[in-house]
Each structure stands twice: as C-alpha cells, then as structure tokens.
C-alpha cells in the first residue's frame, strides 16, 4: 500500500468531514486567503509593548487577564493608535529625547518609551 496515497485520502476525508460538520451547524464559511493583508503578523507593532506589559504576570482566571488587557488599552495614549509603527522622521524624536531628559517627573515617560520602541 502506498503511504502517500493513504495519507492523501485521509486528509481529504478529514476535510470532507469538517465541511459536513460546519454545514450541519449552519455556519457560513467565508473565503479568506492565506496571505490576506488583514491578518496580523506576529511582529505587529502592538504586540511588543503588550508583551512587555504582561511579562511576568500570571492569571488564575481568564477574567483577570481580560481586565488587565482592558486596563492596558484604556491607559494607552491616543497617539499610540495613530502611529503605524514606522518612524518617518528620526530627527524629531532625537530632539524630543533631549527635552525629556530635563523633565524627570513627567508621567508620560512610559508611554514615550513605548512609542520609541514601536518606532524602531
């Protein structure tokens, strides 16, 4: 018996069974190409700052995680979402960094640091 033919048949059978089950549940199958531009790549600019924020945290229940995520999103500066993650003008950021050195009590330093990380 040719193993490759057997494997191919089992994949087809599995796909057919999945299609039948989805039809039985009445779920609508939407076409979605594998390289669709709306799929978020793993290096999406949001994930780095979010991973740093959640780093070292442990959650016993899902609601605690959801609450922490909502808190993080609610406290993000609105400019975070306007930025596409690409730094168009590095010189302006360098000038801003010089001004930030004089302001040690600035509460927005964490947000500025996250923006800098995103723009790199």
Image (cartoon, grey):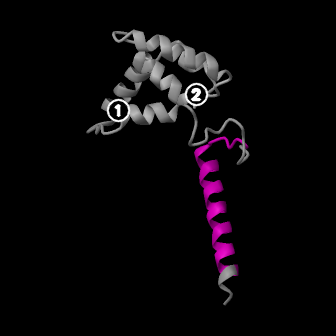
| Secondary-structure class at tag 2 | helix
Tell me if residue 83 comes above or below residue 57 in the rendering. above
Task: Identify the image quadrant of residue 107.
Answer: top left
First in sequence: mark 2 or mark 1?
1
Query: In this orientation, which residue lies closer to the viewer: 2 or 80?
Result: 80
Circle 2 residue:
119
Cα separation between marks 2 and 1: 27 Å
Q: Position of residue 7 (x, y in %)?
A: 64, 76
Q: Position of residue 14 (x, y in %)?
A: 61, 64
Q: Quadrant of the N terminus?
A: bottom right
**Residue 96 left/right relative to 50:** right
Task: Identify the image quadrant of residue 18.
Answer: bottom right
Tell me if residue 19 comes above or below residue 8 in the rendering. above
Q: For residue 29: magenta?
A: yes
Q: Which numbered dot is residue 65?
A: 1
Q: Which numbered dot is residue 30?
A: none
Residues in magenta? 5-31
Query: In this orientation, which residue lies closer to the viewer: 49 or 66?
Result: 49
Q: Position of residue 15 (x, y in %)?
A: 65, 61
Q: Residue at x 56, y 43 (%)?
A: 42
């Amino acid at each position: 018996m040719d193993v490759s033919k057997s494997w191919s048949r089992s994949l087809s059978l599995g796909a057919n069974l999945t299609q039948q089950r989805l039809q039985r549940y009445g779920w609508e199958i939407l076409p979605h190409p594998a390289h669709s531009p709306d799929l978020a790549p793993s290096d999406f600019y949001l994930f780095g700052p979010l991973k740093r924020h959640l780093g070292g945290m442990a959650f016993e229940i899902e609601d605690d995680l959801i609450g922490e995520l909502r808190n993080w999103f609610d406290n993000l500066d609105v400019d975070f979402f306007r930025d596409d993650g690409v730094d168009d003008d590095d010189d302006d950021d360098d000038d801003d960094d010089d001004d930030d050195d004089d302001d040690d009590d600035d509460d927005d330093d964490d947000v500025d640091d996250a923006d800098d990380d995103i723009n790199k």
